[in-house]
Structure formats: C-alpha cells, structure tokens
Image (tube, helix red, strand yellow):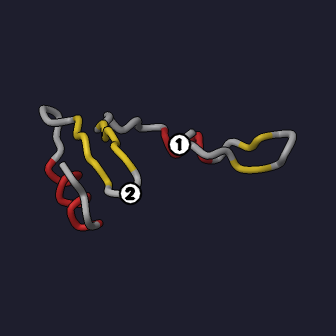
Amino acid sequence: MEITSAEEIMILLSSMDKEHSVARIYVPGIGEFTIVLQKKEGNSGAAAEERIPAAGLTRNPYL
C-alpha cells in the first residue's frame, strides 16, 4: 500500500487487529516498511525509568 499522508497511516494503524497484525507500506522517496502490531506489555513503563549509569541518561524503552 502506498502512503502519501499521515492520515492514511492512521487509518491503516486503526484497522489493525489480532488477525490483521502485519502491514507493508511504501512511502514514496523513502522506501518500504513493515508494520507489526505487538501485544502491549503491562510493565513497559517501568523500563522507561531505568538510567544508564555511565551517561546518567534515561533509557529509551523502545530500543
């Protein structure tokens, strides 16, 4: 599916569910992407509070 606006991405994301959990999109000028819907973990907020000792920075929970 070719994406040309943010609204199209939001429509695609809102239509995803357990049965339709993978979507492939093409963004002109950037490339192809695969979006995978994953189950949300209950403790994902706890990881955001971790600090990296050497740098004193907050850890990014998405990495």
Tag 1, which secondary structure?
A: loop
In this rendering, would 9 be left or right of 19?
right
Residue drawn at 53 percent across, 42 percent down: 62
Q: Quadrant of residue 38?
A: top left
**Which image quadrant: the C terminus?**
top right
Location of residue 3 with respect to 33 vertically, above or below: below
Which amino acid is tagged 1?
Tyr
In this rendering, would 6 be left or right of 48?
left
Which disc, if any, is residue 16? Answer: none
In this rendering, would 53 be left or right of 26?
right
Residue drawn at 25 percent across, 40 percent down: 24
Location of residue 41 with respect to 16 vertically, above or below: above
Please name which of the two marks, 2 or 1, marks the residue nearer to the observer.
2
Which disc, if any, is residue 62? Answer: 1
Q: Nearer the viewer, residue 32 or 15?
A: 32
Q: Nearer the viewer, residue 58 or 23?
A: 23
Mark toward the start of the polypeptide (2 vs 1): 2
Q: Nearer the viewer, residue 61 or 4?
A: 4
Residue drawn at 18 percent across, 48 percent down: 1
Residue 33 coordinates in the image, percent (x, y) = 34, 42
Residue 2 coordinates in the image, percent (x, y) = 21, 53
Q: Give the CA distance from mark 2 to mark 1.
A: 25 Å
Location of residue 9 with respect to 17 vertically, above or below: below
Crowd tier of the residue under label 1, counting other residues whose Cα lies within 10 Å: few below 14, some 14–19, many 20 or above: few
Q: How many marks?
A: 2
Tag 2, which secondary structure?
A: loop
Residue drawn at 32 percent across, 57 percent down: 28
Which disc, if any, is residue 29? Answer: 2
Crowd tier of the residue under label 2, counting other residues whose Cα lies within 10 Å: few below 14, some 14–19, many 20 or above: few
